[in-house]
Image (cartoon, rainbow, N blue to C red):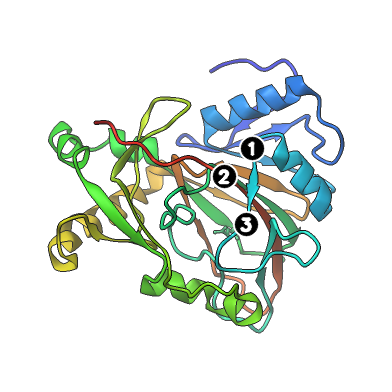
Amino acid sequence: MTTYRHIDVRPVAGALGAEVAGVDASGPVPDEIVVEVRRALLENLVIFMRDQRLEPQSQLAFARRFGTPMIYPLIKGLEDCPEVTPVIKEAEDKVNFGGIWHSDTAYQEVPPLGSLLYAREVPPVGGDTEFANMYLAFERLSAGMQHMLERLVAVNMSGKGRARATRSAMRSAAATALADDALAAAHPVVRVHPETGRKALYVNVAHTSRFQDMSEDESRPLLEFLFGHLARPEFTCRFRWEPGTLAFWDNRCTQHNALNDYHGHRRLMHRVTLEGDRPGGPG
Ligand code: SIN
């Protein structure tokens, strides 16, 4: 484990995730802290900074230290700050946004580097988010399976049924002009992380519909195996939010799943998503 001079980094699970203390994201953040936060992200894949006091503009300013914020394609952002997307489940809603294992918007040609999600209102209990380590998911496969997957490309679609359902309540309140099923992109099944050089499994149950040049029926058995495999408990951590917690995940090597176990309570998060790069395969 590497050491840090300016921040305190405490892993929350064996697979991934760390709580990071010593960062005040609301003000000007010194360069040496930005460098260590970035390193903590690359080493832990998702980091959590508690007790922050952020307004949309200050969250955006902090996010800009790590990349270029982008507009989420299918849900409108805040009126005066469109790069900040509210993620809301009202007390009377039954579905929650992101309540399925996924990598964010894998149906875009250039999916995001990562997201910074800030908890504004959380239920008294429930509403945790699970994260999974896609390096480990790849590394724990047999050499034969790894070799086969490294040569495959997957087709990812925004219109896949269950993922589409998790957006339904929020789209009825704040849909963009883009049709819900308008986006599709083909990406390597195994992507090489552009900063660490490590290989990560890059298919997800929310968006991946089939392998390129194969039918959905032909693809289903292997995809179903991979969807079950990548969410094995030993590849995951589960995070309990408090108001004021800011999470930052690396979308290139993780997946997440927002648990929907708090009917009757409101949960409000603000998300800023950072531009990424086109996924590259091992070939
Ligand atoms: C998301 O998928 O971006 C939402 C995650 C969450 O609300 O915990």
Label of residue 243 in the image = none
The Cα atoms of the two marked residues, 2 and 3, are separated by 9 Å
Q: What amino acid does circle 2 point to?
A: Glu
**Relative horizontal placement of residue 282, taking residue 112 as reference (left or right):** left
Q: Is mark 1 within 8 Å of ligand 1?
A: no
Figure check: 135 above or below 203 = above
Figure check: 47 above or below 39 = below
Figure check: 145 above or below 32 = below
Q: Is mark 3 within 8 Å of ligand 1?
A: no
The Cα atoms of the two marked residues, 1 and 3, are separated by 13 Å
Q: Hey, which quadrant is residue 12 in on the image? A: top right
Q: What amino acid does circle 1 point to?
A: Gly
Foreground residue, 32 or 90? Answer: 32
Quadrant observed for ligand 1 in the rendered image? bottom right
Q: Which residue is disc 3 drawn over? A: 71
Q: Between disc 2 and disc 3, whose residue precedes? A: 3
Q: Position of residue 140 (x, y in %)?
A: 27, 35
Asked if marks 2 and 3 touch (Cβ < 8 Å), the reply is no
Asked if marks 2 and 1 touch (Cβ < 8 Å), the reply is yes
Residue in the picture at 48% in, 75% down:
179
Quadrant of the image containing the C terminus: top left
Label of residue 275 in the image = 2
The Cα atoms of the two marked residues, 2 and 1, are separated by 7 Å
Residue in the picture at 57% in, 75% down:
177
How many marks overall? 3
Q: Position of residue 224 (x, y in %)?
A: 24, 59
Q: What amino acid does circle 3 point to?
A: Ile
State the SS at label 2: loop
**Disc 1 crowd, CA 10 A, few/some/many (<14, 14-19, 20+):** some
Residue in the picture at 17% in, 60% down:
219
State the SS at label 3: loop
Q: Which residue is disc 1 drawn over? A: 67
